[in-house]
Amino acid sequence: MADTRHQVQSGNGNGLTAILGAGSLGRLWAALLPTGTTTFILRQHAPEEHKPDVTYRFQGCHGSQFPVTVPSMDWTTRHPDVLIATTKAGDTLSALEATLPNLKPTVPVVLFQNGMGSQQAVAERWPNRPIMAASTTEGANRPDNSTTVHAGRGETWIGALTPSASPLVTGVANQLKASGLVIHEEPNILRRLWGKLIINAGINPYTAILDCANGDILDAPLFRETIGQLCLELAEVMHLEGLPPRSPEDMQSQIEAVARSTAKNTSSMCSDVRRGKPTEIDYINGFIVSRARAHNLPAPVNQMLTERVKLRTTKLHEPLSDSPGAT
Ligand SMILES: NC(=O)C1=CN([C@@H]2O[C@H](COP(=O)(O)OP(=O)(O)OC[C@H]3O[C@@H](n4cnc5c(N)ncnc54)[C@H](OP(=O)(O)O)[C@@H]3O)[C@@H](O)[C@H]2O)C=CC1
Ligand SMILES: CC(C)(CO)C(=O)C(=O)O
């Protein structure tokens, strides 16, 4: 008899995971899930356009390396049991708009974005679909186009965002556990996402503005002079959003502890700015500003950090006034 423990109840029972977003995190999952059980959903171009396999070298946490080849999705022959969305927060809604018409309405969708706001937008757009969110502390990056590195082992929590997702969380968690990564079912995923949001709000913008590694923010005057007020703003907004009380001092200690324990890391936001990519600031500090505004509350430090990160992204792309050809 077939072992169905790792199969999601609503799917086709083939254990196929479709990954929307063939970036660092998507490639991490594709490398670690069993060979032949993943497929990448690439950007939609012309329907008849041939989409190639995605090939790269994967480097595990302890330096082991192996080649990975993942076929791109062919909707005419393949039907996934789970779709995991590993696009950036700002791309997720439009990527799903293009993809979900192909996906059976009972197939669970798991959102892996950092920050907040994109998950709610997806759950509100498709309230009858089984939508879940995941919060992960795994770390992956791509030093070049053909290499994906598992930079740090972490854990992943998965929980339901829409009512029809609740009975499917165990099946999805079991399917993803075949990767060997640590997965937990999370009954209160929004609380878990807020927990990560606090860390990202207190580290990422500082590293992006100061163009430095996580640990280097700790002695920087910008951080020292504003982190107390930032945590006060976070505590006020979380209180008004009905989350369990957290003291600003406790949040600050946690932010500083993570900055110390990841001292040599380049944060995702600093890395985005350096590469000239859009950042997720609107879903981190920008999200706090918009929730504060909804409660008629000012959030000046979150606002200032959001503006300065945006300025930094724009500035990097402006031609220098003394560059050749500038007018
Ligand atoms: N990397 C990590 O360690 C972690 C990442 N996360 C979160 O996971 C999310 C993804 O991060 P990460 O993998 O680093 O980001 P990447 O930028 O490396 O990957 C995102 C991928 O999505 C692709 N994409 C964008 N739009 C579409 C679309 N419409 N259809 C198909 N593919 C699309 C991008 O393609 P293209 O390059 O062509 O734009 C890119 O390959 C982020 O929200 C991040 O915060 C969370 C925890 C850890
Ligand atoms: C925790 C932290 C800051 C680690 O670098 C992170 O999640 C990120 O870079 O986005």
Image (cartoon, helix red, strand yellow):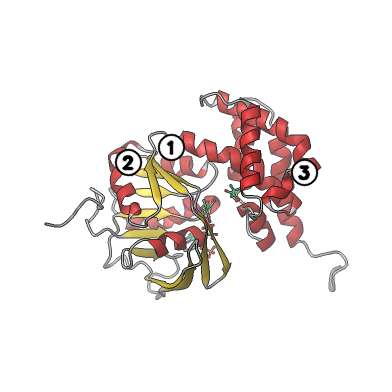
Q: CA distance from mark 2 to mark 1?
A: 12 Å
- Residue at the location (39% across, 62% down)? 32
- Mark earlier in primary sequence (2, 3): 2
Residue 13 is drawn in which quadrant? bottom left
Q: Is residue 154 rendered to the left or right of residue 281?
A: left
Three-letter amino acid code at disc 2? Ala
The residue that label 2 is drawn on is: 165
Q: Which numbered disc, 2 or 1, marks the residue closer to the eye?
A: 1
- Mark earlier in primary sequence (2, 1): 2
Q: CA distance from mark 1 to mark 3?
A: 33 Å
Task: Look at the image and tell me whether residue 310 can be seen.
Answer: no
Three-letter amino acid code at disc 1? Ile
Q: Name the foreground residue: 23 vs 303.
A: 23
- Residue at the location (48% across, 33% down)? 191
Q: CA distance from mark 2 to mark 3?
A: 44 Å
Q: Name the foreground residue: 327 vs 50.
A: 50
Three-letter amino acid code at disc 3? Asp
Q: Is residue 286 above or below residue 15?
A: above
- Residue at the location (27% across, 39% down)? 167
The residue that label 3 is drawn on is: 219
> Is the distance from the Cβ of mark 2 to the nearest ligand 1 atom less than 8 Å?
no
Q: Which mark is residue 189?
A: 1
